[in-house]
Image (cartoon, grey):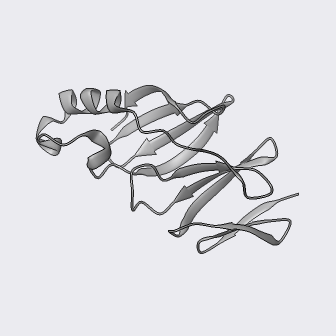
């Protein structure tokens, strides 16, 4: 079976299974389920769904990331929390059974495939 996307709709085996509020930028199939990266309009723009279009998780915001990013990019945030700032995810990859997300502010996050929680953060730009 195969996942495909067209505009804001996700398909499984050529049948529509769900729609999102924004255009789908990319998808990655993983063990029968699908990661969906939406166009960067909001910070938490990564979803994990099953073949029925049911949400398994939406990437979790993590206020701890804000403190790490703020230390490295002080002027960028000026009193805002990370999730209030414009740092949406721009790319995703599966590396050695881990999901890696890359955001607009130059950070890579290792994300738990089980629940969408951010496990680690690294500055890559």
8 vs 100: above or below? below
Left or right of residue 28, residue 88 in this image: left
Residue at image location 66% in from the left, 31% down from the top: 114
**Quarter placement of the N terminus:** bottom right
Left or right of residue 125, residue 47 in this image: right
Between residues 119 and 72, which one lies in front from this camera angle? 119
Q: Position of residue 8 (x, y in %)?
A: 59, 71
Query: Quarter-wise, where is residue 52 in the image?
Result: bottom right
Between residues 122 and 39, which one lies in front from this camera angle? 39
Residue at image location 83% in from the left, 59% down from the top: 2
Residue at image location 47% in from the left, 63% down from the top: 39
Residue at image location 39% in from the left, 50% down from the top: 43
Q: Position of residue 118 (x, y in %)?
A: 48, 30
- Please give the count of numbered marks on the rendered protein: 0
Q: Position of residue 74 (x, y in %)?
A: 13, 35
Name the outermost residue toward the bottom: 7
**Quarter placement of the C terminus:** top left
Name the outermost residue toward the front: 54
Query: Quarter-wise, where is residue 78 in the image?
Result: top left
47 vs 125: above or below? below
Query: Quarter-wise, where is residue 40 in the image?
Result: bottom left
Q: Position of residue 23 (x, y in %)?
A: 53, 70
Left or right of residue 87, residue 57 in this image: right
């Amino acid at each position: 079976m195969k996942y495909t996307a067209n505009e804001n709709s996700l398909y499984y085996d050529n049948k529509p299974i769900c729609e999102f509020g924004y255009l789908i930028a990319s998808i990655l199939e993983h063990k029968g389920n699908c990661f969906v990266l939406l166009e960067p309009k909001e910070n938490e723009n990564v979803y994990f769904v099953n073949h029925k279009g049911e949400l398994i998780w939406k990437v979790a915001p993590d206020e701890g990331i804000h403190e790490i990013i703020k230390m490295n990019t002080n002027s960028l945030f000026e009193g805002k929390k990370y999730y209030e700032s414009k740092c949406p995810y721009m790319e995703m990859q599966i590396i050695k059974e881990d999901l890696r997300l890359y955001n607009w502010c130059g950070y890579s996050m290792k994300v738990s495939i089980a629940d969408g929680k951010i496990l680690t953060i690294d500055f890559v730009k």
